[in-house]
Image: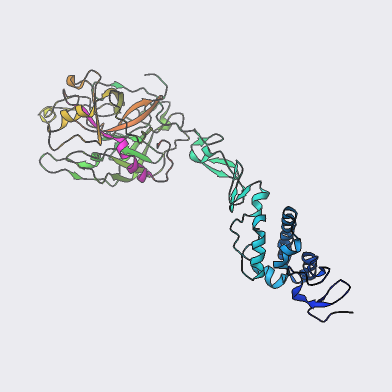
Amino acid sequence: ISCPSGEFMCKDASRRCIRESWRCDGEDDCSDGSDEKNCYISDSTQQRSNTTNEEILIYEDLRNLVEKIADQQETDRSRIFVGCSQDLKKRFSECLSKCKKILCPVQELKSFLSACKSGIKPSCTQNCNPECIKNQGDCDNGKCLCKDGFSGDDCSIKDCNPVCVEKQGDCVDGKCICKPGFTGEDCGTDIVKCGVENPVPTRIVNGVDVNVARKYSWQVGLKPRKHRAENYFCGGSIITNKHILTAAHCFYDFPLFAPCFKNIPDKVFVGIGDHQQEDTIDDLSDVTDLIRSMSITTHKDYNCETNDNDIAIIELSRPIDLLKHADVLHPICLPKDDCETYEGLTATVSGWGGLVGYNIPENQLPGFQQKFPNILQETQVKVLKNSKCSSQIDGKYPPAVFTDNMVCAATEEGYEDGGTDACQGDSGGPLSVKDNEKHVQIGLVSFGFGCASKGNPGVYARVCKFLPWIENIVGTEKTYNLP
């Protein structure tokens, strides 16, 4: 005895035929319930020849989850699975197309299968990639929560120490790959140290010679031509392997009876690692270099009459090899962006500027002759309060005025007595204070009324005010010392 095509024979004594569509529909149409038994097994076996391997795999995964749900809820497996067992090929593969490789969590399976039955593609709101669990992650509202040391949508990415990326490294397969100039497991150790004095023992007006071993190796000098006989017309400091910090007024002309104006040359030459201007040989001559500028950028708001925003950056035509000379050449450290006042601290200023002090207008009198040193000079000055600077500068030589973009300093004995000071030729050079044995550049030589003149402190551009501007120009170049 058999049933016509499209019908199912009950296994009870009646052996009656019912519609095939009534089988596994959640209702007992046969007295012995045979139409609702082995639904997930019979359909999977009957339909496998018409399905892809991937569909069979997903089917089996769902069946395993059904068994878990049935065990937990004491529910008939066939009733839970009825939704997708009706037509494996046409409906099951269709409704799973949106969720291939991911499965709804157990608590959503019932509604998932119900959506399959009606032909709707389900939206598994709490889906996680099964690789998440495989990689020891936890699924929480569709988000894969990874254990420490792993990340990614499926927790397959092995992490590095977070310090690696915070410092100067890139994380590749769990290994911290350091950028040039850094070393250590987390790339937190600088090969190139900023602001470090060279430790070999030993005028700026009334100053002293700087020791031969490049005590302030970040100090540079600017020449108009590539000629050793030329004196440096301005100073500057190394802030990266391709950038020099200096003063904007170094690239302006200041005629006596006419307005000042910008006069940026096509190129300047930057003396690197120099100790003395004359072309001499010493045990560190291989460190010295003369590099041409590629570009010169002055601050867009620099005012050559008031001297406000007196800062510029030179980009070099080729990088300084700071790694090769890491034991001798050091960039200077830049300050933090909190713009500390530094009032009362002792600071160092260095350069190859004039040695003869004077009061304005002595330098314009007949017979006045300035002298320039061969050897780099240094002196120590005391950072003064802003209010003191304003009272001594504002209104003295209009239109010059002291602003928040400036810092002023004088000798320890007090600016009233003159003493040591920066002078012509020192412009653009660094004013630095020591912080944890490292020199931090808080200013750069800008202007003054005379040199070491009584009652006239030296004025410097306040570097911390220009950090965003500096970083914008430096861009992605290797920086060893930005805060």
Q: Is residue 414 magenta?
A: no
Q: Quadrant of residue 352?
A: top left
Stretch in magenta? 456-474
Q: Quadrant of residue 339?
A: top left
Residue at (84% x, 73% y) in the render: 10
- Residue 277 left/right relative to 132: left
- Image: 15 above or below 466: below
Q: Of residues 74 and 316, which is closer to you in this image?
A: 74
Residue 38 horizontal/vertical position (percent):
80, 65
- Image: 227 above or below 92: above
Q: Of residues 393 and 80, which is closer to you in this image?
A: 80
Dominant secondary structure (helix, strand or loop) of the stretch shown in magenta: helix
- Residue 473 left/right relative to 384: right
Q: Is residue 466 magenta?
A: yes
Residue 449 horizontal/vertical position (percent):
16, 30
What residue occupies the far bottom of the structure in this picture? 4
- Residue 96 left/right relative to 296: right
